[in-house]
Structures are given as C-alpha cells and as structure tokens.
Image (cartoon, rainbow, N blue to C red):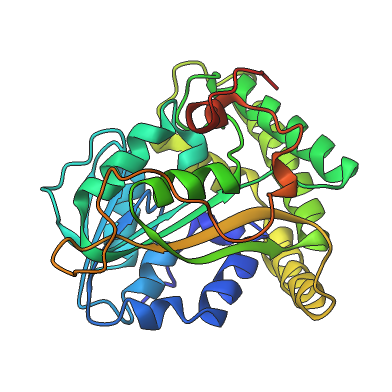
Amino acid sequence: MKKPIYVEELSPDTPCKLRHFRKIRLFEAFRDKCVLDVGCGTGYFTSHLAATAGRLHAIDIAEANAELTRHNVPAATVTVGDVHDLPCPDAFAECVFCSEVLEHLADPVQGVRQLDRVLKPGGLLLLTFPIRPRLPTSRFLLRVSDRLTAYYYGSDHPQAHQGLLRIEDVSRRLAGMGYSMLRQDRIKNTLVLHVTEIFSISVKLAQLLIRGGRAGGVELADHAAHVNAAVSAVWRWLGLPACRALAIVDALFNGFDSSCAVILARKPDPSEPSAPRPGAERVSVPGQRDPDADGLPAQAASAFSGASQKS
C-alpha cells in the first residue's frame, strides 16, 4: 500500500509539535475516548490520534482535505464543516483536538464557543496556535509569509491568517468559562522557526509562479494539490530530515524563541461538587504575564482582548 501523503508533514515545525504532544503524553490522555479532531487538514495528527482513541471523528472545511483524511486514516469518521458552526450535537466528544485553526477564523471567540459546545462536561480540550516570536528575524519572516498568503488567496480566505492570538487571552477566556488549565506551553523552536518561514515563503512564491499569478477565487480544497506541486523531491529527502535534526537541537538547548502555543484544559463538570460554574466570574491564570502579549498585532486577537490595533 502506498504511503499516505500528509501536507502537514511538509511543514518543518510539525516534528516539534508531535514531539511535544508525546512529551506531555497527550495521546495517552485521549486513550479509549471519543475524540474530535477539528481542522484535521489531510490527517497527519488524526493518524496519531487513531492509535489510542476509542472513537475518532474529524472535521475540515475543505472537501479535498476531508477526502485525503478518509484515505489516510480509515479509522476516522470524517465530515466537511466550518468551525464557526460545527456539524455536531452538543456534548458530542470526550476530547477535542484543534491545532492551528483559531488564527484562521474571523471570529475566534465563536470558534471557542463551538468547541466548548461539542465537548462533554469534564472533557479535555487541546488547542495549538501561533504566537508572536521574539526574534526580529522570525517576526519579519512570519510577516512576509502571511502577506504572501493573503495576496495569493485573498485576506478573507480561510487559508489566510486573520491575526496572532495571545496565549494569556485564550487562557483567560477558557478560565472564565470554568475550564481548568492543565498545561500552557510554548514550543521552543528557534532554528526550525526560521526554516519553517523560509520554506513557507518559498512554497508561496512557487505557487504564484506555477499558477501564473494570484489564485483569485480558488477553493481551499485545492491547497493540498498546490503545495504538493510546489514542493520538490529535494525537500522531501533533504529538507525534512534536516529540520528534524534542527528540532532535536532546539529541544536539547531549550531554544530561546517560540512561535507556537499549546493549551490543554479540562471542561467543568456540573455534576462534580467542586467544579466551577460555567459563566462564573473570570479567574486569573497562574503564572506571569505572557511576554508575547506586549505590542502584539491584534486582528483576530482583538476578539479576545478587546484591542483594535491592526498589524
């Protein structure tokens, strides 16, 4: 059987996320549970969830991504749907996995509300999303990459980033809903971060050359085909192993910059006497103020923090 092709595997920072999930024993926490993967892409992380989940469901906005996930992960029940209005009943899943989705939403607060709606009381919610890196070179590369995406697809396209979120704002939003914060981590990826953004910029430039200009009204479903067409075998055989090696170096030296936040939280269960009441007054999140929050471009983050500054 031909090895599945995952578009996510072409992103150099994917090994960093996978290593971190294994480090915090995330997949073990989901063992034998009903798991919902929201924004599954082509099924890379879905395939890892399938190894431990009791029942696995996945949702993506793109039909082509959903088809690839069905092919790559036969154990998953895959549906096409929008995070703003998930096609699932209330209290549907015991665990919800949502990686790199919120930053694409025009209304991330509504996205969080939908994730909360489909999660059973006492269930686990895993969120990952990009945050503003500290190094000027990292911020510059990220800005160029985002602007190329907005130019190619259009700024209102689901593939484009609507803005970067603050980890403190997302944590406080969840805490205000009664969630217990189990983990709030930043994935250290100094070296890989630079390679990731350079690679992303290269792919977008290649896409522009292949199509001879902007995508215009191209559907998000075509994104996987564009990426596969833009990436050469040289990258598969040389680039990815090099990035995996850089990820190990980052981990060994505890890299001093990060571009990705990971939040693991537990939804309150009203049947438990000690559980906080949903809608109760917000509680402060333990720990220091998020240093990434200062001077952060708002955009989608403004929905959480009330800011209105544009990047």
Spot occupied by residue 233 in the image (x, y as percentages of width and height): 67, 60
Image location of residue 99, percent across then percent down: 46, 54
In the shown orientation, is residue 292 left or right of residue 130?
right
Q: Is residue 270 left or right of residue 52?
A: left
Looking at the image, is 93 positioned above or below residue 130?
A: below
Q: Nearer the viewer, residue 4 or 159?
A: 159
**Camera-nearest residue between 264 and 252:** 264
Q: Quadrant of residue 60?
A: top left
206 lies above or below 260: above
- Residue at 79 percent of width and 46 percent of height: 198
| Image-quadrant location for residue 30 | bottom left
Q: Nearer the viewer, residue 6 or 117?
A: 117
For residue 25, side relative to residue 255 (left or right)? left
Picture coordinates of residue 200 (x, y %)? 69, 44
Q: Quadrant of the C terminus?
A: top right
Q: Does the rendering let one see residue 56?
A: yes
